[in-house]
Image (spheres, helix red, strand yellow):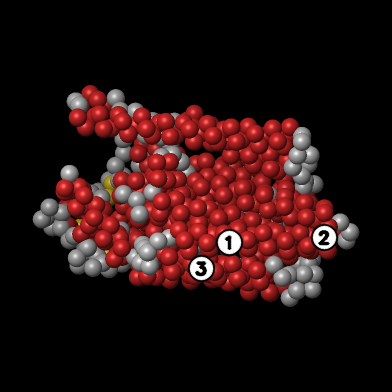
Amino acid sequence: MTNRSDNNDSSTETSTNGKNPKKTLAKRGGTAGGKRVSTLSTPLSSDESYVNGHLSRVALASLAILTFITFVGNFTQLQLSAALPTIVSEFGISVTTGQWLTSIFQLVMGVMVPLTAFLTRRFTTRQIVIVSMTVFAVGSLLAWVGPTFLVVLAGRLLEAVGTGVMWPVLQITVFSIYPLSRRGMAMGTVGMAMSVAPALGPTFGGFQTDSFGWRSIFFTLTMIGVFCLLLAIFGLRNFGTTDDHAKADFFSVAMSVLGFGGLMFGFTNIESYAPSNPMAWGAMLVGLCGIVWFVVRQVRRAKAYTVAVRQSVDESDTAQRTTPEPPLLDLGVLRNRSFTVGTICAALSFFAFSSIMVIMPLYIQNDRGYSATISGLVMMPGAFGMCISQFFGGKLLDRLGARPVALSGTLVLLFGTIMMSLIDGNTWIWWVSIWQFVRQIGMGFIIMPITTWSLNCLDPTEVSAGSAVTNTVRQIAGAIGAPVLVILMETLIQLHGGDTIAASIFGTQWTLRVSAFIVFIQALIVLFGVKGAGAGSSRDVAQRAIARIRTVSHR
């Protein structure tokens, strides 16, 4: 993750106010000559973290720890997908109910992400990570020993709470450390770990399920959680500053839980109840009301905060102290057209990705009769495809910009999904693996480049809010994608009737075709929404930065 930067980049100055960087580090509590000169709690500034075109040793170590812990969270998300048929059978529940083990993880992570802006203002990096890993370890332990499905589900909920803020914290840290011209490569490098995790999860989950039972998955996660906790305690440094007076809008948190949770609950009840039953439409209505209330509240609080900040600039310090807290989720960043386009593209990708990671193991195990281990192995090559494309996607973003990279990725994803939809009852099982590999290459060229580009299009002061918005939308899209397409698949199965396996394969085929149609819409958005041949490239980012400087200087 160590990078060199151009000598002309203003973010890679080798001194701070003309002083020697090593002396500055010593004063601030960083490292001098590779030696520790202060406690772990001393925060590192961007100048101390990125010196002479390189990450400092202590910053590299801390960033590696954050990346590994975030990898664990992403690894955990879909680890149960290969074990899902076994869990459904053991507890005697429906597939739609069982997939809550994956959907609730993503839903809770989506709810936790908006809290990141508050948490990073109020608490230090070490405090956030240490508490998060403690909650994650407790949740894994509860799921490991849980005697009923509800207890296991509660354990998964705690796991999601523990890992929900890690990716935004890592993302904000990367953006605060790296100069503009190196963010594409930095995010691509970090994204390699993030992209491999969800694809490796089902592989290891399937192997553990066949070898030691599905509960061994949670035993392993408990041990990993304890290890991550020790890493955070003894090796992690703080980044940025904190505000002890910052407050969170927990009413907005409750509204987001009620809104998105109610919407998902209503969707999943469609299988058990008729659409006219209040358990279905009533839950969805409550969810929609909660979402509308949440959005309206965020818009009003953002307006009040903006007005108060403008007044405090012209008034006394007392006015500054009475300035209201910013909204939980600053939706004002969506006024930036480029950011909105990037967020929509990432959301559609997650919608399609998460659903297929649930649907295909069901096809491999239930329709074709293969073991959970084979199911995981079939899905695993996609991890390597996404890993490769994430790395080169970041580099290509810096050189070519977001439009050609994301458009190429979307077309590859579309082609791979169409080819995967050609499966039947006699298809060579590794056909699925080949086209999953192709699909993941496309995903790698979409998610990280388009997300990095969209955040680069924001003002530097808006990156934290933008990160919270885009990650919230992505996680919720992934959480809703799985139940929606699983319900679609089961509805198609019922409409087909006849032989159970033939009906299930028919449902899987058409669900994949619907997913391909979603990717086609995404391709149109990228084609017409990402403007400029070099949008997001290093040159484009530099021009934006210069334009901002000129605008400020003319005021």
Residue type, mark 3 in image: Gly
Whether residue 122 is visible: yes
Q: Residue at x 73, y 40 (%)?
A: 269
Q: Which residue corresponds to the image point at 80% horizontal and 56% vertical from the top-left?
A: 493
Which label lies toward us, 1 or 2? 1
Closer to the camera, 248 or 203?
A: 248
The numbered dot on residue 101 is none
Query: Which numbered dot is residue 503?
Result: 2
Disc 3 target residue: 409
Badge 3: few (under 14), some or many (20 or more) residues near its Cα, within 10 Å? Answer: many
**Residue 500 appears left or right of 158:** right
| Location of residue 494 with respect to 246 vertically, above or below | below
SS state under label 3:
helix
Residue 70 vs residue 36, the one in the foreground? 70
Question: Which image quarter: residue 47?
Answer: bottom left
| Residue marked by disc 1 | 519
Q: Relative to 454, does residue 402 appear above or below in the rendering? A: below
The percent position of residue 391, horizontal first and vertical second, equals 43, 68
Residue at (49, 29) in percent of width and height: 251
Q: Position of residue 120 (x, y in %)?
A: 37, 42
The residue lying furthest to the right in this view is 498
The residue located at (59%, 67%) in the rendering is 414
Label 1 environment density (alpha carbons within 10 Å; few <14, some 14–19, many ≥20): many
Quadrant of the rendered image containing residue 365 = bottom right
The answer for how far apart the CA atoms under marks 2 and 3 are is 32 Å
Q: Secondary structure at mark 2?
A: helix
The residue type indicated by label 1 comes to Val
